[in-house]
Amino acid sequence: MKLNIELIDSRLKELEWSRYRLAKEIGITPNTLYSNLEKGSFRTVKTLSEILGLLETDLVIKG
């Protein structure tokens, strides 16, 4: 599953958060976050949706 990294980074910018901060908010290490962003999973999408206030459907690139 491919995640919409541009949308995630845009939302982080709005919140004035770094990816490091996002990892801490989720409760994982930054390395785990980067790995999860690369491979994507349903769990990752659900967590990002809840933390960032974005729709799950917007976080996934279709196709």
Image (cartoon, rainbow, N blue to C red):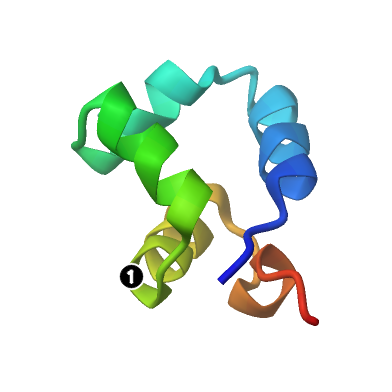
Task: Residue at 56% x, 71% y: name it.
Answer: 1
* Residue at 34% over, 31% down: 23
Q: How many marks?
A: 1
Horizontal and vertical percent position of residue 51: 44, 51
Q: Is residue 3 left or right of residue 44?
A: right
Residue 18 quadrant: top right
Residue 45 against residue 6 in the figure, above or below: below
Residue beneath label 1, please? 43
- Please say if 56 is above or below 22: below
Side of 33 relative to 29 (left or right): right
Quick one: 40 or 48, which is closer to the camera?
Answer: 40
Q: Position of residue 3 (x, y in %)?
A: 63, 59
Query: Which amino acid lies under the numbered mark 1 shown in the image of this protein?
Result: Arg
Q: In the image shown, does 50 or 33 lie closer to the viewer?
A: 33
Q: Is residue 22 above or below residue 58?
A: above
In the displayed structure, 57 sits above or below 24; it is below
The image quadrant that residue 13 belongs to is top right
Q: Is residue 23 left or right of residue 29?
A: right
Characterize the local packing of mark 1: few (<14), some (14-19) or many (20 or more) Cα atoms within 10 angstroms: few
- The percent position of residue 21, horizontal first and vertical second, equals 40, 20
Q: Please, what secondary structure does the residue beneath circle 1 have?
A: helix
- Residue drawn at the location 40% of the way across and 18% of the way down: 20
The x and y percentages for residue 63 are: 80, 82
Q: Is residue 57 left or right of residue 1?
A: right
Residue at 39%, 49% (x, y): give it: 36
